Image (cartoon, helix red, strand yellow):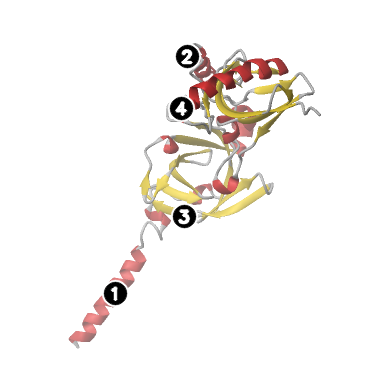
Amino acid sequence: MIKNTLYFSFFVLMLSACKMGTKTSDPTLRDFTFEPVKGIRYVEVKRRFKDGYSFNKEGFMQKPSWIIQVVKEDTMSAWSPQKHRMQNFYLQYDHGNVYNFAAEFFKVKHISKDSLVFQRIQVDGKVIASDVRSDVNMTFYAQDYIKNNLKARAADLQKPTKADTAFIEKRSAQVNANSDNAFAATNPVQFIPKSKIARVEKISTVDRTNNRTEAYDYMFPQYIIRIDRAYKDFAYQVAAVVDFQGGIHVKTVYNVLPENAEAKKKVAQGIADIYVRNLFDVAPGTTLGIPHNSEITLTIIGKAIKRP
């Protein structure tokens, strides 16, 4: 009799525990649920660092681009630029107000029918990284709110602000004072050939399978310049700062022995001064239309005339 009573008591406790649930299994136990905003389509209108700017000092620009819609408590739909349609993702609750969908972690900071605010975070193991990778706030407005309340277009709301322009003007003045300093230009350097014996190729390093987005192409721009009818064959790959006036300043020559580095740097600088500057119009990199020093990787290949 006692044994049966113990079994019955244990069963009741287990049943009660199941009914109580946890935050993982029962959304009503969390700080909020997504139920009140289900079916509302939101457009990301701004993406800012914690200091309120769209840019950091290295020149990386946060571009708002997401379109999302809560399908149900465990499903988030997001616009796929590749597939040109909304695509469903599992909306996984992690802990606190942290969720995961579309291979990204987000901390939900605000939720209403008009707007959402997510903090994009980097999670290593089970720890939220405290560096710049978690220093991103994304604001979404409901499409109806944009149209009917703000009477605006999402594209206009997504543009950089006057504060962003002031930040870039200040940052440009800082780096332009010294040709050793630079930051990435959202509109990178352009080499415009002036002769048929010279051509240029800008290398794209975008690789979505390894999370290399289009930002890599302006943060770390790479070029190959080929010159025919050079005085002799040569090939150099260099890191160079292109200043706000289009001047080229070689900083490092790659793939050379340390004892030869300085001599090779002088040769590479001479090639840049004589060949590149004479055979190309060099347009400096710009951000928000402001020219400034920016760093590039440049491979220069010269081919001598083949004599009989």
- x 37%, y 51%: residue: 126
Residue 181: x percent and y percent?
48, 18
Kind of residue at disc 3: Gln
Q: Are marks 1 and 3 in contact (CB under 8 Å)?
A: no
Residue 74: x percent and y percent?
50, 56
Q: From mark 1 to mark 2, how far is it between C-alphas?
A: 70 Å
**Numbered disc in front, either 4 or 2:** 4
Instruction: Residue at the far left: name it.
Output: 2
Q: With respect to residue 65, does 25 lie above or below?
A: below
Q: Is residue 18 visible?
A: yes
**Numbered disc in front, either 3 or 2:** 2
Q: Is 107 in front, or is 187?
A: 187
Residue 303: x percent and y percent?
72, 28
**Numbered disc in front, either 1 or 4:** 4
Which secondary structure, mark 4? helix
Q: Which residue is mark 1?
A: 12
Which secondary structure, mark 3? strand
The N terminus sits in image quarter: bottom left
Q: Which residue is mark 4?
A: 259
